[in-house]
Amino acid sequence: GESVGLHLPTLSVQEGDNSIINCAYSNSASDYFIWYKQESGKGPQFIIDIRSNMDKRQGQRVTVLLNKTVKHLSLQIAATQPGDSAVYFCAENPGGYQKVTFGTGTKLQVIP
Amino acid sequence: ETGVTQSPTHLIKTRGQQVTLRCSSQSGHNTVSWYQQALGQGPQFIFQYYREEENGRGNFPPRFSGLQFPNYSSELNVNALELDDSALYLCASSLEGASPLHFGNGTRLTVT
């Protein structure tokens, strides 16, 4: 069945370094991908999205890369800050109504 | 711009009881989705409402039902509560089509 999986459950990064969070997806019909950040006690917060006709998209300090050949998605965070500490989810939407499928998440810990 | 608000924030119910959770969507958004998030897991899609009708459903039994009102607010109803229904219930609003979901901070339901 369709699934969104993450390679690492926990990622520890020194403050100021760049972070890379990886994600594999299995539904080749997915045409829209989203990264969310979830802080403790809060709902997921939209970070950045990318459509399947693109392979890279940049935001403020964040970049999402999409490799459709190997069904791989990554989130790069530049100059990681303590406020970036959270659980990050990649999510995919196979189109039509928005049955967005989430992975289990990667916890990012920023070391001061 | 008012974000997604959910009520109540916390709720304790007994097995077999019924519960209603409420959600006000972000202004301008006409689609509402509900997700269940177990501890340490990613959100799981329950269903989506558009124009007051359910237009997509995940792998949840019929005792999970919902409503969307003309002002786009929504309710999630769960009958015959089971212990495994204990989770964070998230509401998300969006515009129709592939667009980012905007989440509320959820309702934490505990079933004893």
Image (tube, coloured by chain):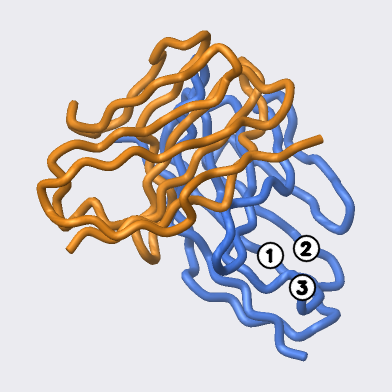
Question: Helix, strand or loop at disc 1?
Answer: strand
- Of residue B4 and residue A84, the one placed in the foreground of this image is B4
Same chain check for tags 1 and 3 = yes
Q: Nearer the viewer, mark 1 or mark 3?
A: 3
Question: Helix, strand or loop at disc 3?
Answer: helix
Residue A83, numbered label: 3
The kind of residue tagged 3 is Gly
Residue B90 is situated, as x and y percent measured from the top left of the image, at 47, 45
Question: Label 1 crowding class (10 Å Cα cut-off): few <14, some 14-19, many 20+?
Answer: some
Residue in the picture at 62% in, 69% down: A86
Residue in the picture at 36% in, 57% down: B11
Instruction: Please tell me which of labels 3 and 2 falls first in the chain.
Output: 2
Q: Quadrant of residue B54?
A: top left
Contact (CB < 8 A) between labels 1 and 2? yes
For the residues marked 1 and 2, what is the alpha-carbon distance in whole angstroms?
6 Å
Chain letter, orange: B
Q: Chain of mark 3?
A: A
Q: Chain of mark 2?
A: A
Same chain check for tags 1 and 2 = yes
Instruction: Please tell me which of labels 1 and 2 falls first in the chain.
Output: 1
**Residue ID for mark 2:** A77
Q: Chain of mark 1?
A: A
Q: Quadrant of residue A17?
A: bottom right
The kind of residue tagged 1 is Ile
The kind of residue tagged 2 is Ile
Quadrant where the N terminus of chain A is found in the figure: top left
For the residues marked 1 and 3, what is the alpha-carbon distance in whole angstroms?
16 Å
Residue in the picture at 81% in, 55% down: A62
Q: Quadrant of residue A88?
A: bottom right
**Residue ID for mark 1:** A20
Question: Helix, strand or loop at disc 2?
Answer: strand
